[in-house]
Amino acid sequence: MTEDDVYKQLQTVYDPEIPNLSIVDLGMVTAVAVQNDEVHITVRPTFIGCPAVDWIRKQIEEAIDPSRCLVQIDPSSTWSTEHISETGRRALKTFGIAPPSSGDTIMVCPLCGSERTRRTSLFGTALCRSSYYCENCRQPFEGFKTL
């Protein structure tokens, strides 16, 4: 098994709150090393105390091979929305969540592409999201907070 093989397998491990976004595209995987018959994977949590960390670890082990996979959670490596890949940003939009924007720019509606949006609540269904409303298509949506 090569590092490329591992990354391909990790593309099948999804964030439990965004089932079409892999942990690779979310930017959680910081290192992969294949040594002899062992696979070492280092993952940074999206935030300290993330309740999904143990679940994600188990999913990684099952995707690779529990008998030869060592997963290290590195809480000292700070995750930010800048780590989300372009593929990940497209996956968020496909799922109906506006990708994070840089700075205080207007949140673009992932449903119709309009900039005529307003935040209705700082809090969404997850800690990393806020609630918005699109004045153009008149639909509510969530936007990923810029962290």
Image (cartoon, helix red, strand yellow):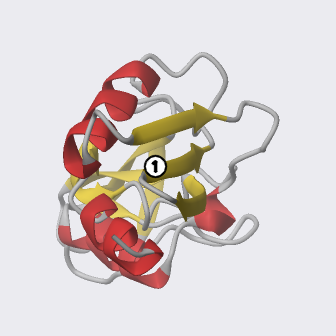
> How would you rate the neighbour count of disc 1 (Cα within 10 Å): few for under 14, some for 14-19, many for 20 or more?
some
Residues 26 and 32: in front is: 32
- Answer with the quarter of the image where residue 4 lies: bottom left
Residue 124 percent across, percent down from the top left: 39, 33
How many marks can you see?
1
The residue lying at 30 percent from left, 28 percent from top is: 58
Q: What residue is pinned by disc 1?
A: 38
- From the viewer's perspective, is 105 left or right of 3? right
- Answer with the quarter of the image where residue 110 lies: bottom left
- From the viewer's perspective, is 44 left or right of 133? right
Residue 24 percent across, percent down from the top left: 43, 63
Q: Is residue 135 visible?
A: no
The residue lying at 31 percent from left, 83 percent from top is: 113
- From the viewer's perspective, is 121 left or right of 110? right
The residue lying at 60 percent from left, 16 percent from top is: 49
Residue 10 percent across, percent down from the top left: 32, 60
Residue 7 percent across, percent down from the top left: 39, 70
Above or below, 93 against 124 in this view is: below
The residue lying at 25 percent from left, 44 percent from top is: 65
Identity of the amino acid at label 1? Answer: Glu
